Structure formats: structure tokens, C-alpha cells
Amino acid sequence: MKNLFFKGHGLGNDYIALNPTTLSFKLTPRTIRKLCDRNWGIGSDGILAMSPSKKADFGLRIYNPDGSEAEKSGNGLRIFGCYLYHTRQTRKKHFTVETKGGLVSIDLEMNGDGYVGGATVDMGKAVFQPIALPCTLRVPELIQQPVKAAEQSLRFTGVSVGNPHCVVYKKRDERWTRQDLLEIGPELENHTIFPKRTNVQLAVPTGPKSISILIWERGAGETQASGSSACAAACAGVRLGLVKSPVRVKAPGGTLDITVDSQYNITMKGPVMEVARGEISHAFVHSL
């Protein structure tokens, strides 16, 4: 049995994609951590594992590098679409994928060389009362909620786009630093008001239809980009009246275009690239 893998990235947010049925070992939290380790394994921000689905063309389970499971990943979905097409598991350029965070549709975009260069993903509908929040905080009119982290009094907008997000905005003439992210991110991710932990975005509006974000992902830490984070931050910005759709979201790794309609249905458009394909060595498999 060949232990084949595919690696791709979306704006520097990289994932390993594979089919668990072709592996000679099981995907457990321990083996996932070893595969994602950048010094002792292949290295990635997570694992995209194909799974069966009765509701969609394909099923997908998404694992964080700490071995925990995520409900949805925007960049991961673009990479998964690239994986499916480049490994000839589909010749379609439009198909559906079932995730734990809901059903999505993917439209692949080809570059001039015949490779997948980008994708548009229907990410579903944003909800401003994410399941990660305890019932005492589920107040419909409370768009921004108070929280303390890193000895700062902050106000966040809780958004679920199939997975939970905590968006903290600063004013247009202010800015967040990487040091802010490293201090605030882990505290908010593991804050007691988020019993299932949460993804964190530190956001600033930069124009009437643009924002910039720094990202701390649940189970992964600081990342260069995140599709679901871009969607959550864009939806929060629209809800707060800070920006209008379509929103261009700039992260350290690059830019995604997010469209938010009047019902907060989300469409995400962005680049994707295949990095490598290969076989996990027998020696590494034995070490697992």
C-alpha cells in the first residue's frame, strides 16, 4: 500500500491532503501531529482527509496540527479542490463538499498552464451567535461583547461560519502588531467563554471595502492566512457598519475577496497552488 500525499497552500496557509483509505496507518491525534511537524514530519497547518459523503460529491475531514478536528477551512477547501482535480479524482471544475461545518460548493479556476490557480467557494451563512458562546452571552442585539485578554479590555464580535471566530476590531487609524497577536491570540483561543476554543482575528478597516487582519487559529496558532477567518472578519465588519461588501481582506500571506449578501451568505475567492506530491517513506511510517 502506497502512503501518498499532496501538499498545497493558499496564501501561505498550507495543508496536506490525502485519502485515509490508501494509508497503511490510521490518522490519530499522534500521527497527525507528527505529519504536520515542520522539523520531524512533512510540515503543514493541518490535514485534509477525504471521507465518504451521501450529501455531496465528496466528504472532507479537517485536522489541526495539534491533532484536534476543525469544522471548516476556507483555504483548506480551495486546496482540497486543487487536490481532487490534480490527482484526477474528479475532472469537474464545479462540485460540492460536505464538511463538519456544513455543505459547500467549489468552483475551480484554471491558469494559462492548465493548473488550478484559484477557487471560489460558497462558504454558507454567517451566524452571529456561535455555538462556542455560552447561552448567557447569546443576546441578539449584542453585536460586540466585552472580554479581557492580555490585561486588555477588548470588545469582540462572535461569528460562526461553520466554525467559531472571535473578531476584534480597532479603529481605522489604529493598527495591530504581531506582538499583540502573540499575546492576545492564545488567551482568547482558550478563554473560558469559549468552551470549544475559538479562532481569533485582530482586524482594522483600511477603506470602505477593505480590511486587514492578523490571524490566530484554533489548534494551529499564528497563520499567514485563513479563508474562514477572512469570511468571519468581513461579516463582522459589514455587521458593524465598518465596511461594505464585497470586502477585500488582506492577511500577512495575501488577499482574499469576500462577498457578503444581505442575509450574510458568504462567497470567498482566492488563489491556491499545488506544492508537492509524494510518498511517505516506510521509515517514517514505521516511526509512527
Image (cartoon, rainbow, N blue to C red):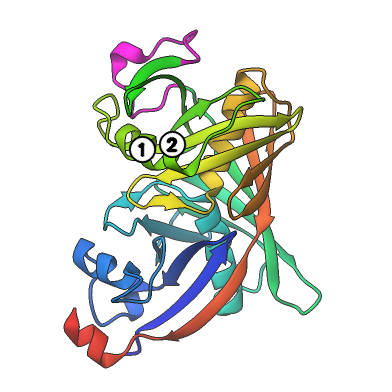
In the image, 20: left or right of 275? left
Q: Residues within 10 Å of mark 1 (few under 14, many from 20)?
A: few
**Which residue corresponds to the image point at 38% horizontal and 71% vertical from the top-left?**
43
The dot on residue 180 is 2
> Residue 249 lies in what quarter of the image?
top right
Magenta span has 135?
A: yes
Q: Kindly identify the amino acid type of the residue bearing the numbered disc 2.
A: Asp
Which residue: 26% across, 58% down?
67
Disc 2 to disc 1: CB gap under 8 Å? yes
The main secondary structure of the magenta stretch is: loop
Residue 45 on image: x %, y %: 41, 60
Query: Where is residue 182 drawn, in percent x and y?
Result: 38, 43
Verify whether residue 224 appears in magenta.
Answer: no
At a point 69% along the width and 62% down the height, the residue shown is: 118
Q: Is residue 86 left or right of residue 59?
A: right
Question: The disc labelled 1 sits on which kind of residue?
Answer: Glu
Q: Is residue 56 visible?
A: no
Question: In the structure shown, which secondary structural element does the residue marked by tag 2 occupy?
Answer: helix
Location of residue 32 by image quarter: bottom left
Mark 2 to mark 1 CA distance (whole Å): 5 Å
Instruction: Please state the total of marks drawn on the protein image.
Output: 2
- Badge 1 is on which residue? 183
Image position, residue 149 (x, y; %): 33, 26
In terms of secondary structure, where does tag 1 sit?
helix
Q: Looking at the rendering, in which quadrant would you find the C terminus?
A: bottom left
- Depth order, front residue of 16/3: 16
Instruction: Give the extent of the magenta segment.
Output: 129-144
Of 103 and 17, nearer the camera is 17
On the image, the x and y values in percent for residue 38 come to: 36, 71
Q: On screen, 181 above or below 254?
A: above
